[in-house]
Amino acid sequence: MKINFWFEVKKRLLSKNVEDEVVKVYTNIRVLNSDKTWSYSVPAIIDTGAHTSLLPKYLWENSDYEYISDSLFMGVKSNLLCSLPCKVGKITIALLDTEGNFHPIDIIAYLSKTNDTPPIIGVSTLMNKGKVCIDYKNRKGFLEF
């Protein structure tokens, strides 16, 4: 089973006359609700720099997650001003792609107490599930189980 990723490329201006590209890798995800139905599909960023996944409240609040603890999610800049209050929990999500491939997995994730973040799938979450390939140059990527 293979879940294909897709890429979004945007140009950005770093300074006067200096431009580069921001390339983001995506997959669609769904969350298993407490009534055993799947949520609607939303795009999630595959973050190669994130060790753990982060889900906004609207995705997990109706799920049957297993509570582990409360925590603060801190990004690159580790200070309280740049942190998000979260729960840490075990949750079932499904990865799906535009070809119709669908694969449920159990993950441990930060469950944000707000909706102020996009869904982020940490690459280490995926590395424990199968083979991850992200080819930025050719804009191809997948997770193979």
Image (spheres, helix red, strand yellow):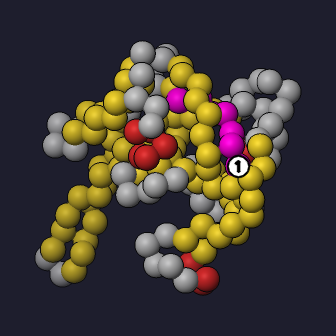
Q: Overall secondary structure of the magenta stretch? A: strand
Q: Quadrant of the N terminus?
A: top left
Residue 131 magenta:
no
| Residue 66 drawn above or below residue 48 | above
Residue 42 pos. (x, y %): 59, 38
- Residue drawn at x 58%, y 53% is 54
Q: Quadrant of residue 137?
A: top left
Q: Quadrant of the C terminus?
A: top left
Q: Quadrant of residue 25?
A: top left
Q: Callout 1: few (<14), some (14-19), or many (20+) C-alpha neighbours within 10 Å?
A: some
Which segment did they paint magenta? 89-95
Q: Quadrant of residue 112?
A: bottom right
Question: Which one is in front, 107 or 32?
Answer: 107
Residue 104 pos. (x, y %): 59, 25
- Residue drawn at x 60%, y 40% is 107
Q: Kindly identify which residue carries mark 1.
A: 89
Helix, strand or loop for disc 1:
strand
- Residue drawn at x 78%, y 32% is 33
Residue 23 pos. (x, y %): 30, 52
- Residue drawn at x 60%, y 67% is 73
| Residue 33 drawn above or below residue 54 | above
Asked if residue 57 can be seen in this view, the reply is no
Asked if residue 134 can be seen in this view, the reply is yes
Name the side, left or right, on which 101 lies relative to 8: right
Q: Amino acid at mark 1?
A: Gly
Question: Which one is in front, 83 or 116?
Answer: 83
| Residue 132 drawn above or below residue 83 | above
